[in-house]
Image (cartoon, helix red, strand yellow):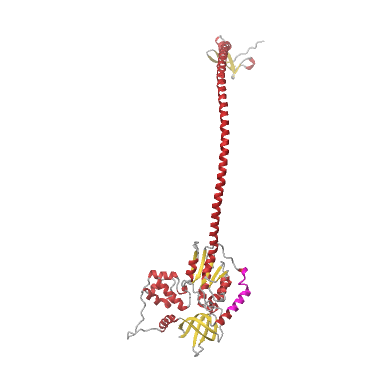
Amino acid sequence: MRKLKDWRIEAARREGVDLFRVFQNTTLEEIAASKPKTKDDLLAIKGIRERKFEKYGAQILALVGGNVEPEPEDGRGEKLYTVSRFLDLLNNNLRASGARIQGEVSSFDLRGSYLFFSLKDKEDESVLSCFMWSKDYALYGIELEAGMEIIIDGFPAVYKPTGKLSMQVSAIELVGEGALKKAYEELRKKLEEEGLFAPERKKAVPALPGKIGLITSETGAVIHDFLNNLGKYGYQIKFINSRVEGQVAVSGLMSAVDYFNKQDIDVLVIIRGGGSLESLQAFNNEMLVRKIAGCRMPVICGIGHDKDVPLASLVADLGVSTPTAVAIYLNRTWDDAVKRLAVLERDIFYKYQELLQVGKYRLEEMAGSLRKYFGMIFQEFDGIRHRLRSALADIGYNIKSLAKMLDDSFGLVFEKFARNFQDQGNFLDETEKRLKIYDPRRQLKLGYCIASAGGRVIKSVRQVKNGDSIDIQVSDGKMRSIINEINKIN
C-alpha cells in the first residue's frame, strides 16, 4: 500500500492533478489486497477501466509483481507493435516527462470545450503546441493573449488520430511579479466592490468548536505545527490532503472545499506555510475565493505571505497569518472555558466552605433550641405522667364502683326477668286453656259438624240450593252429601 501511494503521488505530480484523479484510496486498497497478476485481474477492480489500464496498467502490474502482457514478435524475434499500441506505449512513457514550461503565447484558439494555443521560446523562436480543456482554462481566471508570457504545467502526449505531439496543459499562470501583482489588484478591487470582503457578510466562528475540516498538504511541517498546537479538547478532525503550491493546486483545493461544504463540521480550516505571490497563486484564484465565500460553515484561512494578504484569507470568515495562529484561535474559547471552570471550581469550593460554616452555626443554634424544647417536653411529660397516674387511680376506683353497681343491677334485672318469665308462662297456660275450650275440633268431638260448599263454611240455607254438593267434616273425617230438601226456619 505504501508503494502504491508513493507511486500515485508521483503520477499526480507529473500530471498536475489531485491524487484521487489518479486513483481513489479504495481502489488502491483493493489493488494491495488482491495483488492482481494479469490485465483481467486489474480490470475486475472497481475504479479501473480500459482507459485507466492504458495509462497505468503496466506500471501497477510491475509494482505489485504481476505479469505485463508481452508484445508480439516478428519472425526475427523482435517486438512488433501496432501503431495504436506503440502510441499508447509512447504516451505512457511521455507522461513521465511532465514539466513546468515558460514561454510566450503566439496563437490562441478556443473551440467549445477545447483550447489550442502555441507557446514560443523568446530566444530561438521554438514553438510548442499546447492543448487544454476549456473548463481547466476557466479555472485559473487568466485571459490568454498573443505575446503574454506564462508558465504551464502538463505533460507531452501524441494525439493518436493525427499523430501530432502537443503539450497537454493542466494549469497556467502568469510570469513575473509585476503581472501577478496587477492581476491580484484587479481581482481584489473587483471582489471588494462586490462586497465579498465586507465584515457584515462573514460568519462567526462558533464557540467551543469540536468538528473541524482541514485542508492542506500532508507533507511538510505545516500540518504538524497545526496539530501540535491544537489543545487536547477532543477535536474531531476530518482531513483532505491537497496540493497548496502554485496554480496547479486550484482544482484540488476547490474539490476539497466542495466536499467539506456537504459535511457535518463546525469550521473549515485551510492552511499552508509562507510563500511568495507566485507560490500563493492558487489562493488568489477567483473561483476558489468565491467557493470559500459561499461555504455554509465558517472558514478560517491560515496562509503565510510576504506582503499581500491572499484573497482567500480576505474572503474567509477569519484570516490569520500562520497555521499556528489558527490552532491558537480554535483553542481560545476552550482555554477560556477551562479558565472559567477553574474560577467556578474555586467559587464553588469557597461557597461550599461558607455554607458549611453557616450550617455549623445553624446546627449549634438548633441544638441549643432542641435541648431547651426537649427540657420543656420532658417537664411536661412528667406532669402528664403524674396526672395520668392520678387519672388511672380514679379510673380504677370508678371501675370498681361500676362493677358493684353492675352486679346489683344484674341481680335486679335477672330477678325482674324471672318474675316476668313466670308471669308470661302463667299467661300462656291460661291462653292455652282458653284455646282448647274454643277449639272447633273439641266441638266436633262433642257431636257437632262443619258443613261447607265451594270451600266456604255454610252459615245460612241461602248459600245453597237443592242438588248442590256439600262437604261435612266431623271429628274423625269428612263426608260429601247432595241436598235434596231445604227447610227455612222463621
Give the percent coordinates (x, y) of residue 123: 50, 90
Q: Residue furthest right?
A: 490
Q: Does the magenta segment cover residue 189? A: yes
Q: Is residue 181 visible?
A: yes
Quadrant that contains the C terminus:
top right
Q: Where is residue 291 shown, x and y percent of the image?
A: 56, 72
> In the image, what residue occupies the spot 61% across and 76% down?
190
Residue depicted at 56% across the width and 42% down the height = 364
In this orientation, which residue lies closer to the viewer: 102 or 303? 303
Residue range of the region highlighted in magenta in the rendering? 184-200
- Residue toward you, 323 or 464: 323
Quadrant housing residue 456: top right
Q: Position of residue 453 (x, y in %)?
A: 59, 18
Dominant SS in magenta = helix
Viewer-proximal residue among 465 and 439: 439
Above or below, comparing residue 380 to residue 442 in the picture: below
Q: Is residue 229 above or below residue 398?
A: below
Q: Is residue 219 above or below residue 385?
A: below
Residue 480: tell me if it is visible: no
